[in-house]
Amino acid sequence: PPDVEQLGRSSWTLLHSIAASYPVSPTPTEQSQVRQFMGLFSKLYPCWVCAEDFQEFMTQNRIRTESRDEFGQWMCEAHNDVNRKLGKKVFDCSKWEERWRTGWKS
Ligand code: FAD
């Protein structure tokens, strides 16, 4: 249904934007908060199949919160996992910051 797509686009915008504004050198508290957020997000995501698969991804791929780049890369890999499942193009994760933080280099 189209609202799963709308929900997805909006949610990825939020998630990659959170990664983009995450500290370059996060404190232990900041790391713990982002882990708690992602854990709860994956449980509350209002598309049940999506949430189930995302929780499975999080079990197999431990969240990386040591730096902005680690977290941004991890989020990009999580998104690529869904892209693959849906037969969409895999995104080049070396470009996540250009897409979500600094803007495309023209
Ligand atoms: P989106 O996939 O929404 O991407 C939006 C934009 O993000 C793209 O235009 C591109 O510029 C950028 N982008 C793409 N890939 C990456 C990446 N790897 N890293 C950084 N930026 C990127 N839909 C289902 O049908 N089944 C599911 O099981 C499912 N699970 C989901 C789980 C989660 C946690 C989320 C947030 C969404 C899920 N979705 C699922 C929705 C799906 O991922 C898409 O959001 C939706 O299909 C709309 O796709 P889109 O082509 O508009 O672009």
Image (cartoon, rainbow, N blue to C red):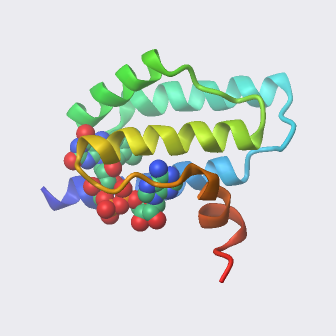
On the image, which quarter does residue 69 sit in?
top right
Is 60 rendered above or below residue 85?
Answer: above
Is 66 rendered above or below residue 20?
Answer: above
> Which image quarter is the N terminus in?
bottom left
Residue displayed at 40% across by 25% down: 57
- Residue 25 drawn at (x, y percent): 87, 37
Res. 31 visible in picture? yes
Tally the marks. 0
Residue displayed at 73% across by 53% down: 21
- Residue 101 drawn at (x, y percent): 69, 63
- Residue 32 drawn at (x, y percent): 71, 23
Residue extending furthest toward the bottom: 106
User: Residue 89 vs residue 37: left or right?
Assistant: left
Residue displayed at 67% across by 58% down: 97
- Identify which residue, 93 or 30, lies in the foreground: 93
User: Residue 8 vs residue 34: left or right?
Assistant: left
- Residue 61 drawn at (x, y percent): 50, 22
- Identify which residue, 90 or 16, lies in the foreground: 90
Residue extending furthest toward the left: 1
User: Residue 81 vs residue 15: left or right?
Assistant: left
Residue displayed at 52% across by 45% down: 76
Res. 9 visible in picture? no
Residue extending furthest toward the top: 59
- Identify which residue, 71 or 80, lies in the foreground: 80
> Which image quarter is the C terminus in?
bottom right
Is 27 rendered above or below residue 2?
Answer: above
